[in-house]
Amino acid sequence: MGGHYLHVDWHAAQSAKHPGAPCGDATDCRRGLDGAMFACVDGIGSGMRARIAAQMCLARLLELMRQEMSLRQAAASVAASMQKLRDPQKPFAAFSVGRVRPDGMATVLAYEAPPPLFVGRREASVLPGRPIESPGALVHEYLVQLDAGDGLMLMSDGITQAGIGGTWPDGWQAHRAAQFVAHCLNQNVAPRQLPEKLLLQARQFNDRGGDDCTAALAYCRRGVILNLLTGPPADRARDAEAVRRWLDAPGLKVVCGGTTAEIVARHLGVRLKIEPHPSSLIAPPRYELPQIDLVTEGAVTLNQVYNLIDEDPTELREDSGVSELVSLLNAADRINIYLGRAENAAARDISFRQQGILTRRRLIPLLAERLRAAGKMVVVEHV
């Protein structure tokens, strides 16, 4: 779990060909241990039929990669299928699909789609690509090394073909789109606003109706890492090893659990102190350990955090371990959870079940699911 975390933010903007109709494009971004994978898909035609075609193609691309098929294999497989569906009555879709690995190495594969744009801090350019061998379909590959502050812009052809036959006889084209993005960057437009700016500019050229338009930016930045240790290891002989690995991981350090905090205190050779004057009447009091960002009680705190993680953070007005942990989780991009497998004798008490307090073993997967739904990268390791 070492090394800094290069987080990929996904910002997308879409508009339909006809006002009020569904957009025939689809986008998505998923994060895993091997990096962020994302796609921009353009369904044939417009309206609901195109939307369904795009969603079907997108789902297949991401599912193939989730099943550990390589990016190239997934793109080749879907492109070959799409090649057989080149018919307005069939669910054909063009696509760009990419991955940014944890070290910043990025690959985009495009089938019947515009080339991606490299987006730097002050410049933007069309990435040079090359055709790759793909049975039954022509796929182009684009490679680039990204760092924090860099990004990749994917587009549907509604952007690059904007103004075709009118303002731009050959369409706006990718190189002009890149020039516009560079202009925005030099006007200090924030990265998250670039897709919307690009889309609005393209729509201005569509005096003849245009097409569905999508622009999506995969933007890299240094991510915030939070390391949460909760529950003692199953084997007491491994206490020191588990604490050492957790301490050595880069990022914020959080302990949830009184027994777990005592183990950490022994490892550090310090005394565990309890919060002297807690202000909350609901949340358990915090503990204090030098060098540790937050130390809380375990099961009750985690259950309250789970109940509040989706709530408006401005509503959490009290100062407590629960509100502080919710804030830290919301601020984090990658959350490493070190989950101890030792049995908690207190959790067997009937009063826990009477109050609806879930054990760590049951709660952590549910909390991880909610955090992932919020776009977090969550890694759970049992110790």
Image (cartoon, rainbow, N blue to C red):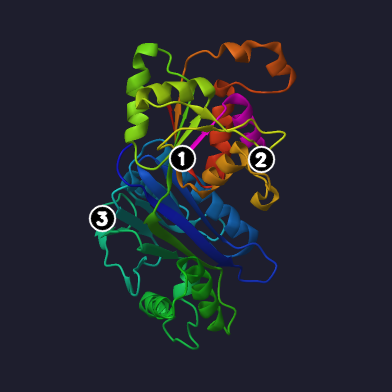
The location of residue 175, given as percent across then percent down, is 35, 77
Specify the principal SS of the magenta part.
helix
Crowding at dot 2, Cα within 10 Å, few <14 / some 14-19 / many 20+, comes out as some
The location of residue 219, given as percent across then percent down, is 41, 60
User: Bounds of the magenta span?
Assistant: 294-308
Disc number placed over residue 132 in the picture, else none: 3
Crowding at dot 3, Cα within 10 Å, few <14 / some 14-19 / many 20+, comes out as some
Of callouts 3 and 1, the N-terminal one: 3
Of callouts 1 and 2, the N-terminal one: 1
Which of 255 and 15 lies nearest the eye of the viewer?
Answer: 255
**Residue pictured at 63% horizontal, 35% vertical:** 277
Residue 106 seen from this side: yes
Q: Is residue 17 above or below residue 329?
A: below
Q: Is residue 290 above or below residue 119?
A: above
Which of 108 and 252 lies nearest the eye of the viewer?
Answer: 252
| 345 relative position to 234: left or right | right
What residue type is disc 1 on?
A: Asp
Image quarter (top left, top right, bottom left or bottom right) of the C terminus: top left
**Residue pictured at 68% horizontal, 48% vertical:** 317
Q: How many marks?
A: 3
Q: CB of mark 3 within 8 Å of CB of mark 1? A: no
> Alpha-carbon distance for marks 1 and 2?
20 Å
Which of 304 and 172 lies nearest the eye of the viewer?
Answer: 304
Report the residue marked by disc 1.
293
Mark in front: 3 vs 2: 2
Instruction: Name, please, the residue furthest toward the front.
Output: 276
Asked which secondary structure carries label 1, the reply is loop
Mark in front: 3 vs 1: 1
> Alpha-carbon distance for marks 3 and 1?
49 Å
Report the residue marked by disc 2.
308
The location of residue 271, given as percent across then percent down, is 44, 26
Asked which secondary structure carries label 3, the reply is strand
